[in-house]
Amino acid sequence: MVQISGVTGAGAGDWNRTFGIYDVIPNSFKIAFGFLPALPEGFPTAARVTFLFDEILRVLPLYTRVNLGPGTFQTRGYAPQGVNSWQPKAGQKIVGAGMGVTTLQLVGAAVVKVGSDLVEQHYHAIGMKVSPTGTTPATPVDGLEISDLTIDCNMDGQPLREQSTYTPVACGAVRVFGSHCGIRRVKIINWGTKTLKEGCFVLSIIDASAATTDGSGQPVVQETTGSGIEDCVAIQPSPNCARETTVLHIGGLKNAQNQAQGFATAPFIRRNFVDGMLPQAPLVTLPPPSSLPITSGPGTSTTSDFDPATALFVGRRPHNRGVDTWLRFSNPRDPASKWNGYFFSFLTGTDDRSLYVNLTGSQGTTDDSSLVILGAEIRAIAVSSCAEAVVEGNHIYNCWIGGPYASPLFDPPVGEPTPLPTLAEEERRDPLNALNIRSLIVRNNFYKNVAAGPYWNMGGVSGWVSDDIGYNLNTGIVTITTIAKHHLWAGARVKIEGAPDVRYDGVREILAVPSENTFTYQLAPGQTDLTEDGSCYWRVVSGIDYLTIDGNIIELADLDETEFAIKEYPLAANSTAQTYRAFGIVVGDNELSALAGPYAHRQVFIRNNKVRYVDGQKAPTVANLGPPVGSAMQLAGIKQLHVTHNVIDLNATPKLRTFRIGTARFFHNTRPDGDIIPHRYDEPESLAEDAFILSLFERRRR
């Protein structure tokens, strides 16, 4: 990094600032502007910029307290292949003088040249290595605390290097791995990502890792305890993100070879405030927009009257975006559409709903403009790889998914390589948000203007493992003997494929774990023709064992039936027929349970929640749109379900949507006036009322 100074004349403002340098030779180096500046006048000088904060933190020992006074401290932060990165150490405490008083600003987060390749990375102002190096696992930093300061991720202020437009990196605040780590009273601003290769994790704690395989082929499982994020504030995201951003994250890493994963004990995310409201766009007089993606309407096309080579986006709502900026567009129904990518918008249309867009460079091949989405998702909270986790007392505003959020595992069919996700899909394939959850409580959170509150879109399967399988004729117990320690548990779900007899195959619930290298499941005994032993493939199914959702208030975005939201079950066989709806609570299985066998989720309690639209508004709020149609719950693939004492004030019918449920209990779910909301499952209170009415008819007849 260099500071240019001493330039006079018309270009002084363009030249006299800090740059990242590249292509260094003994007597020269290059800097990038992103535009053509005026020629420099005066007597320019270039001075290397040093980062005292980084230099000091590199040499401080373990268990050191770092007190930061008022002011702004610049840092190069950490990236896996970052230049001059530093990492915190175990037991350190980095303490500011207060949010808004002490600011730690991330600078110099640029694309790094490794050999001849330009590497687009994820930077954190305070970060550390979380992935293994060969057979050497990452080293946890137990007891690390970060508190009482503001972290400016500076996404839109990072330097160009060999790019002419924008800096394709992701910029977050903190990523750590260890037990008893705390992120407290930290304010985060200007976070996000401008690379299609990296989603952004703003405050992230890796709570468990099984990513390492030792020299003997066994997974090295690292599990933490007692780490969490509390009393933090995340506002002012970058307005032009290229991909999804997860703001508050606790999650783990699985082993790619043997699919083992670990589980942290008692992680927590509590009393935080997240607002996805975007900053006010320049020269736009409308109020600042929320970060919720905008759905296209009639008139959207890959050509326009302005220029046949220019695309026209027409939103169903005012987009409130500025011009001369890069924006994310996607077509969730057609991965081959030209609209999937990060494109330059250079001119507004005839009204506040339209934008002219340059699709040059799109990898798409079709002109499908039937459903185009403007904007990238902001997901407030994500939690996985945990047991006894708590998410409570958080306030979430203007985010696509409030959370906790979990996506499905996605790995290829047996014997096929993992395909690279298309631009329409990559936001749904996120290994850091996709692992199993043993037990989780979500309580007393407030969500406003979200397309979904708590959201578990699970039921995916891991990559495959090949091991031996055998059947006990007398007991019907099937035993799988693994080469590597599997780290599964009784009640986990696995999908069996390619066994010597098709009766072995299917989604199975593990009966017992006799040893670290065996697990069992049950078939019918006495099948005399099922005695052949052999090998099979098995995959881990993602799901939740025990989940409680209690006392939350959820105000859904007022999306009508024409707007993009959460996929509505039953999933359409053809993507063009897929329908969407906002949902207060989603516990999904991606229709895995339709394959028969065990459910993706074991036991779910949903009680004492209130679900309504934003500010209780049930009528249309935007011209040419209909009333909101969001529903209270979409629940699927659950073995035991309890839904009790929830209050629902929504237009949708039905308000409670259920699919592939085992044992279900619905009790006293009401409208605000106290009327019972009927459901196809028998409800004890409804049954009691029906019995009372029938008894009156009996008396009268007599």
Image (cartoon, helix red, strand yellow):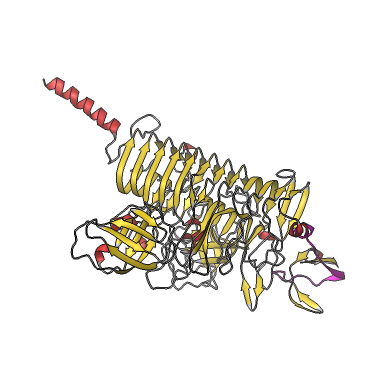
Task: Determine the residue positioned at 56% across, 62% down.
Answer: 242
Work out whether residue 328 can be spotted. Answer: yes
In x, y percent, where is residue 7? 85, 67
At which x and y percent is residue 634? 37, 47
What residue is shown at x 74% (from left), y 57% (from top)?
A: 57
Q: Is residue 535 above or below residue 174?
A: below
The one nearer the camera, 601 or 220, is 220
Q: Is residue 523 left or right of residue 64?
A: left
Q: Is residue 491 magenta?
A: no
Instruction: For the C terminus, give its image quadrant.
Output: top left
* Quadrant in the rendering for residue 538: bottom left
The part of the chain drawn in magenta is 33-55
Which residue corresponds to the image point at 51% horizontal and 55% vertical from the top-left? 293
Which quarter of the figure is the N terminus placed in?
A: bottom right
Which percent across, then down, holds residue 160? 69, 68
Query: 644 above or below 498?
Result: above
| Residue 54, magenta (yes or no) | yes
Classify residue 479 by image quadrant: bottom left
**Does residue 578 appear anywhere in the picture?**
no
Counting every numbered tag in the picture gives: 0
In this rendered view, identify the residue nearer to me: 325 or 145. Answer: 145
